[in-house]
Image (cartoon, rainbow, N blue to C red):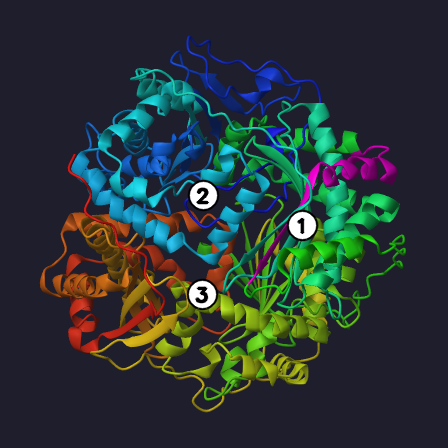
Amino acid sequence: MRSARLLLLAASSSLVLSLAALPAVAVSQAQPVAVTQATAQPSDPWAQAASDIPADANVRFGVLPNGMQYAILHNATPAGQASFRLRIDAGSLMENENQLGLAHFMEHMAFNGTTNIPENELLRILERLGLAFGADTNAFTSFDQTAYMLELPRTNDETVDTALRIMREQVSEALMAPDAVDAERGVIEGEERMRNTPQMRVIKTQLGLLASGQRLANRLPIGDLNIIRTAPRDRFVEFYNAYYRPNRATFVAVGDFDVEAMEGKVRAAFESWTPNAADGPDPDLGQVAARGPETRILVEPGIQSSVEINWIRPPDLDPDTVAERRENMVRYLGLAVLTRRLGELARADDPPFVSANAANATVFDSLSAGSVKASFNPGGLTRALATIEQEQRRLVQFGITEAELQREITDNRTRMQDAVTAAATRSTPALANGLLGAANDGNVFASPATSLDLFNATVEGLTPDQVTAAVRPVFEGQGPLVMVTSPVAIEGGETTVTAALEASRQVVVTARADEAALDWPYTNFGTPTQPNARTEIADLGVTRVDFPNGVRLFVKPTDFRDNQILVNVRTGIGELALPTDRVTAMSLANSVIGPGGTSKLTVDQLTRVLSGKTYSVNASLLTDAYSLNGATRPEDLQLEMQVLTAYMVDPGLRAAPFERARSQFPAQLAQLRATPGGVLGRDLGELISSGDQRDATPTEEQIAAMSIEEIRAGVTEGRAHGPIDIVMVGDITVDDAIASVANTFGALPDRGAQSEPLPGSDVRHFPAPSTEPVQLKHEGPGEQAIGLIGWATTDAIDDKLESRQLTILNAVIQLRLNEEVREKLGISYGPGSAATSSSVFPDYGFQLMLAETRPENLPVLFTAFDSIAASLREVPISEDELLRARAPLVESLRRSQADNGYWVSQLVAAGRKPGTFDEIRSNVSDLESTTSADIQRLARQYLTAARAWRLTITSDNPAAPAAAAAPAQ
């Protein structure tokens, strides 16, 4: 069944090959779904046409006479907005041997000039309407599809008609002018260079092992650099005409619009589209060959140590039916049990691996694979391999228990019930992506209610023996094929791995012991209290409630998403209580506070005793506070607050997660050294804070000297004093919020006054200007380098107007970087800008420009950086450029204001900062009132040559040759 296939979306970007897949479920007899009669037949017809699963009745499915499919769904979350997706049923698997990489290259060219839209105008048109490149305007190419995506901030005629016109032009009118093709070659090469990481090389090796002799093994979408550098225009045209055709296209529109009107617009935009050539052939994907046991080892400095045992079979291409989904769900439940067992082992004392999982999937219609995989610390191969092999065999031999089965059933049913309750307020982009995925995977897009119905029908009377029987075939087939990745050579190589696997098979396994029953121990935190003050902030829909013990509650009921309540709890002064001149064990606190559970229950015991409940907890140490975040539903609000209170007053702070984090650190440091981006992430925080050790990445020696006792003392003291601020936003009433706090945080003893920061801990400085860059080294390929320039700016503590204006300056800089560094110079795939204004440290903020490029291009890159800064200082930006920078920010902000998470983020400081509500009120107006003169003033004030600080990251390893000039066309 294609729904369980492995999806390597945006395969030209970073890929993670994981065989975990949860099949969607649905039930009952399918009702006929009306579709428009078509002359041409779609290459991938809607799955419900051949299924007994009913499609979601709210979706208008159709087919144009030219064979193009569409799906249209009204959804008003968020209000007034829409998501468009346009899928082409063709990806890298369709490429000929002389076209490797051209499916992805073609995706780029669809943005680089069409019959009626000049080369540089397409993105500008969308930016004027409020769509930002990347966030709202994007595309991806995978093995089997190419998709174009737009997030429309409005659904008025101008925005919708323009978006439809652009998408139609992209798929039928791309010019592929020779000069535009040549200009884009450097961008594609830059993308390949940026993606050329140890993780990408793992993917290549893994596909070569699993799909040996099949087309999939040699069709990574990024392609062949030689072809990218030299392919003539006619080769692009050949691919475009063969596969960009209406019968291979599926259009998806989800949003706050009239379905009838939208259907008419889609028809008007695409009905006249006719193909320019014969339909391209579907590829021969090859057959799964007979394979015996085989081992493959990839040694790659900076790679995560891992071992995976795979069994491969012919692909499951059965259509999406009730019976097929039932089979998949039963199998999934068994694999979920095995994955949970492996996860508990990873979280135990002295674990055999860092993480592990079991999975089954069909991979791009080429093969089906079952697997067990573990990631481990260097030197732990034998133990990790033995553990996953024996746990897999233990489940196959002895099966799962009734308690384990019921736990998975309960947790999955709860998630599906929550989905049914929240169905009316599902996210528009998520629904659009769901329809896109259904079209690509050959699945019926079913409603949450249908999925719940089938799940209940599937699990009714289901026994552990039935589940075990469904899982056993996952670990049968060709192989086993063992893949090992390691940063260092393995003594004895494949022979050692094979011997370790055979030795493990000789170990006798026994049945798993039953788990002891558990009770929830956190129901009484003291005498409940009543608030002593209540204040309404009516225009924002916020209520403030004060409790006698210093707890301050801020509640905002919303209708943004049914059945969702987000909670944030903050107290203490966080890292302001830590020294700035030395690294402390508190740098590992976030690896302990959450994973440590509570003193009475480990994380695994928590999930077991609270099975079937909707709750979450994310505990962290922040710059100026300790934070607890949770998400729940109205019926579990009281439980959520009990969990968060228990984490606050009775934390586990166990040694096991501390030792696990400490043991992983040397390997993580090696991984960071392997790429320029890793080195940037490792060192930039310390550098741009002028050596503040709270932002420094510890060394191996510093990690080795740390103790759990220091973390226990620091967390306990850090959370012992000061008011507790609680924010609740979502499907909640103020009275319910008060009740849930009154007998949890409100029942705690008086908190006393806030602690004072350590002397000097509330001060931070951007580094002094430099004429010569700070030079860092990475250990990856020599052709990879990063150049960065930065300037000190200002904070966002009291008056946020200037910091908000700086975000528009940053957006203008990003536009210039895209045009100058990416498009004109073609020396970097993804140049970026970043602006930060601190809400904690007075006068601390910065503006950055950075890009990945070849080392010999660094002088050109810095010249471009300097030129952009100089032009912003010397020449006022045009009103058009201001609009293109500002409109996406304003529309993104408006979109965020219809999300619960936005309001949590805005209200977390309300207890400590009296001006918070005014800052919320002025957010949009501050952006809208920013002028071209403001941008020039800020550039003159901050972006001066004398204030610039520079950084380069290069490698001493040999560099691959640069591209020669493209041939004349």
Q: Is residue 351 visible?
A: yes
Q: How far apart in space, not on screen, are marks 3 and 2 (Cα)?
A: 21 Å
For residue 589, side relative to residue 412 (left or right)? left
Mark 2 belongs to which amino acid? Ala
For residue 591, side relative to residue 506 (left or right)? left
Asked if the residue under mark 2 is in contact with the one under mark 3, i.e. CB atoms within 8 Å, the reply is no
Depth check: give the residue in front, 414 or 144: 144
For the C terminus, give its image quadrant.
top left
Could you tell me which residue is drawn at 51 percent across and 19 percent down? 45
Nearer-N-terminus badge (2/1): 2
Nearer-N-terminus badge (3/2): 2
Q: Secondary structure at mark 2?
A: loop
**Mark 2 — residue?**
11
Foreground tag (3 vs 2):
3
Mark 1 belongs to which amino acid? Pro
Foreground tag (3 vs 1):
3
**Mark 3 — residue?**
674
Q: Which residues are magenta?
A: 459-486
For residue 838, side relative to residue 486 (left or right)? left
Q: How far apart in space, not on screen, are marks 3 and 1 (Cα)?
A: 46 Å
State the mark number for residue 634: 1
For the N terminus, give its image quadrant.
top right
Residue 173, placed above or below residue 149: above
Mark 3 belongs to which amino acid? Ala
- Residue 196 in percent (x, y) is at 41, 54
- Residue 925 in percent (x, y) is at 30, 56
Residue 863, placed above or below residue 526: above
